[in-house]
Amino acid sequence: MMKFLLYISLGNCKKLCYLPGSIIKLVHLRSLNIQGSNVSAMPKGFSELTNLRSLSGFPVHMDMDASNSWCSLQELAPLSQLRKLTLYGLEKVQDSRMAEKAMISSKRHLGYLELNYSASGHTIGTGGAEAEQQQQQSVTEEVLEKLCPPTCLENLTLKGGYVGRQLPNWMCAPASADFKSLRYLRFVNLPCCTQLPDGLCCLSSLEMLTIIDAPAINRIGPQFQASSSVAARGSTASTSAPFPKLRILQLIGLCEWEEWEWNDCEEHMDVETAIAMPCLERLGIENCKLSCLPPGLASTKRHTLRELCLYELTNLTHVENIPSVVELRVFDCPELKKITALDSRLQKIRIVRCPKLEILEGVPALDSLELQDTTMETIPGYLRAVNPRYLKLYCNKKLYESSSSPGSSEWDKISHIGKHKIVCLED
């Protein structure tokens, strides 16, 4: 009766090291999940499971001995019904022809694809010969090029330690414009990638873009949010917006990133969609060296941006002229001196460990202000110029005691704020 089994879920079974060869007899199987297990290879003949819709945790095995009992990457070729596919160990693939034989691009129902590399599976930056490292990088780039997904894809993740110096051509313009269904795109751990492809802005359905840990990128140029001239292959519409549906952008761990060149020219903009990212609602930037936010973000035509989160921007000196923001969070920005000229609808600000902040103004509708820093010796003077409905102050014991006494100089700085709470973070 097992031959009629449809679903097998063995996710996170750490003691599971192999699957029995008899699994290939489950020809009706639709879903197999071994993600998080210790299975390192699949039984030979896995290609018989042509009814699979979901395959999570497929381990790449590269033993080229035809007599072995394990299946290779090319056995994925007949699995044409796949809707979801997660691959692991792609750093083991040393021949791009093997990746091509998997025929990922021909899987016309595939909606979710996750490509995983192992950071421990390569020698880049670990003292290996430079020529060998360059060769390995070239092979890695070629393999990913051949793993091009079908254009019907909705969700793509690349993570784990892709050591290529550049992302594949199918992510660049004009080829990227063919991916009209892609909504979610995530890159995690790109240790050697020096620039982002210019085709991301051409993804007409992209709603969320996340980039985490790309330490080799020090500049994002105008091609990232390029003009509409490359927005679509064969398109003549001059008003097509780059990133037309992007709602959430997260740039985390680009630790050497210093410059973001983005300056939308508004002189010739006659329609709302002319600006890049016209639907952007949330922008999060964490751990980089940007000294300022790009002028393009401050376009007066930008009306959708609601949440701005800035964490660990070590060189950031000011935040100003960002329209429509309702919530601002600024954490660990040691050089930040000024927050000003934000949107009149700004309601909530949270400031954590920004010791040089001197100016906070232009926030007439502020509802909630939260300030946290145990190194503060006095309450910042800029609090005299704001009048939020509610203030929450986290500080050290000494400041807590001095600011809690009516009539003191510290108390006077916040006495005009009708409702406030002071919290001591020290015992």
Image: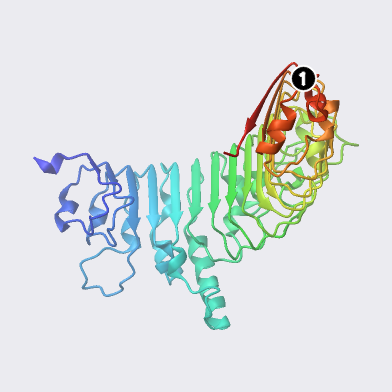
Q: Secondary structure at mark 1?
A: loop
Q: Find residue 371 and report its horizontal and vertical position in percent.
A: 70, 34
Residue 168: image quadrant is bottom right
User: Residue lying farthest left?
Assistant: 1
Q: Is residue 369 above or below residue 152?
A: above
Q: Looking at the figure, which quarter contains the N terminus?
A: top left
Q: Is residue 157 above or below residue 370?
A: below
Q: Is residue 176 above or below residue 60?
A: above
Q: Find residue 394 and report its horizontal and vertical position in percent.
A: 66, 34
Residue in the foreground of this view, choosing between 418 and 396: 396
Residue in the foreground of this view, choosing between 328 and 95: 328
Residue at the image position 62 percent from the left and 53 percent from the top: 253
Q: Looking at the figure, which quarter contains the C terminus?
A: top right
Q: Is residue 42 left or right of residue 388?
A: left
Residue 110: image quadrant is top left
Q: Which residue is mark 1?
A: 417
Residue at the image position 55 percent from the left and 45 percent from the top: 185
Q: Find residue 389 and report its horizontal and vertical position in percent.
A: 73, 18
Q: Is residue 426 left or right of residue 13?
A: right
Q: Is residue 60 above or below residue 415?
A: below
Q: Is residue 320 visible?
A: yes
Count how many numbered circles sit on residues in the image. 1
Q: Is residue 77 visible?
A: no
Residue in the foreground of this view, choosing between 153 and 42: 42
User: Residue lying farthest right?
Assistant: 267
Which three-letter amino acid code belongs to the residue tagged 1? Answer: Ile
Q: Find residue 238 and report its horizontal and vertical position in percent.
A: 78, 39
Residue in the foreground of this view, choosing between 243 and 173: 243
